[in-house]
Image (spheres, rainbow, N blue to C red):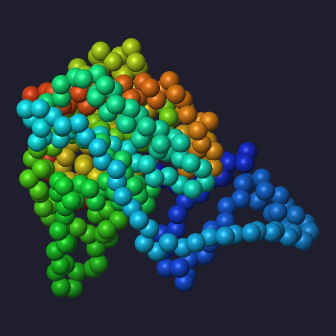
Amino acid sequence: MANAADARGHGLFTLGGNRNSDPATTLTTIVVAAEHYGRVARMLEKNIPVTIEADIKNTYHPTPTMFNAVGEIPGTDKADEIVMRGAHFDSWHGATGATDNAAGSAAMMEALRILKASGVTLRRTVRLGLWNGEEQGLIGSRDYVAQHFASRGAAPAPPAGAPPAAGRGGRGGAQGPLEMKPAHAKFAGYFNIDNGTGAIHGVYLQGNNAIASTFRAWMEPLADLGMTHLTIRNTGGTDHQACDGVGLPGFQFIQDTVEYNTVTHHYNMDSYERLQPEDMRRNATIAAAFAYLAANRDELLPRKLLPTAGGRGGQ
Ligand SMILES: [Zn+2]
């Protein structure tokens, strides 16, 4: 999700990455809390000398190992059709990433355990993807989708004399036409959790109005868990966009923000203490119910028109 570059004080600070990958020209980034920065600034204003001691031990990994973790419960009569659910398990290094996004990963794993332990029949295969490299631009989920469902070819050469493309087609710049794999036609839908520890209250429809009545019916028996909201709005910056960008139904749940935007999201306080266990149990239950219902309805989930350019994202 997006970096919050603002300093909130109270010892909170955010850490992010540097998109410059050339070690010769990339400086090590040091972050200090706003109060400590302010104290230094005030001393300097009064021409009081300031000495800062830092002991920095860092290592540059030019090609770090990256992997996704994938698990599934095979379906029965529609086993070749896939219901996917996911969350990213990478995090920024200022803390352990408890709410961004161990919380989503744990809720999705628990949902799979609930489905398995309850012994319910699943007509379609229910697959879980725990993605790496989300914070660097949906790297894991986009790579998985490209390998299994659809990828984009190279962008067609611009006509002679044309100005350079603005490069809006995702971080990879301009993109070519969609190249569909056979599994694209067998994909039911994708559900994602990546907005912290807060309770799920609904779904962003990503502009897919055709699914609204189905989701409304699914939510009715979950209303006492607080599952009451649908919005036609898009939400961005996380892994459902890997599906949405290639014309597959991909959805992100709406969640209570709790402290997400003030204390945890990319902050040095994103640790275990900030998790809400009751909300996470509720989220796992809702995620399991949605996977069960998507796996057992007669049809795949309705789709939007195929997009002409890759979904944006990777914030
Ligand atoms: Zn995240």
Side (left or right) of 68 relative to 94 = left
Q: Nearer the viewer, residue 140 or 313?
A: 140
Quarter of the image with the C terminus is bottom left
Q: Is residue 140 visible?
A: yes
Say whether residue 208 is visible.
no
Query: Toward which corner of the image does residue 135 lie, by quadrant?
Result: bottom left
Q: Position of residue 65 (x, y in %)?
A: 41, 65
Residue at (34, 31) in percent of width and height: 113
Image coordinates for residue 311, horizontal then vertical, percent: 28, 55
Q: How many marks?
A: 0
Task: Compare residues 293 and 169 and report the one nearer the observer.
Answer: 293
- Position above or below: 178 against 1: below
Q: Residue at x 41, y 20 (%)?
A: 226
Q: Position of residue 109 (x, y in %)?
A: 37, 37
Left or right, 293 with reference to 315: left
Q: Residue at x 26, y 56 (%)?
A: 144
Q: Nearer the viewer, residue 184 or 304?
A: 184
Image position of 33 (left or right of 103): right
Q: Position of residue 47 (x, y in %)?
A: 90, 70
| Above or below: residue 33 compared with residue 117 | below
Task: Give whichever of 216, 271 is nearer the camera.
Answer: 271
Q: Residue at x 39, y 55 (%)?
A: 132
State the image quarter where residue 231 is shown: top left
Q: Is residue 165 left or right of residue 297?
A: right
Q: As displayed, is residue 29 above or below residue 185? A: below
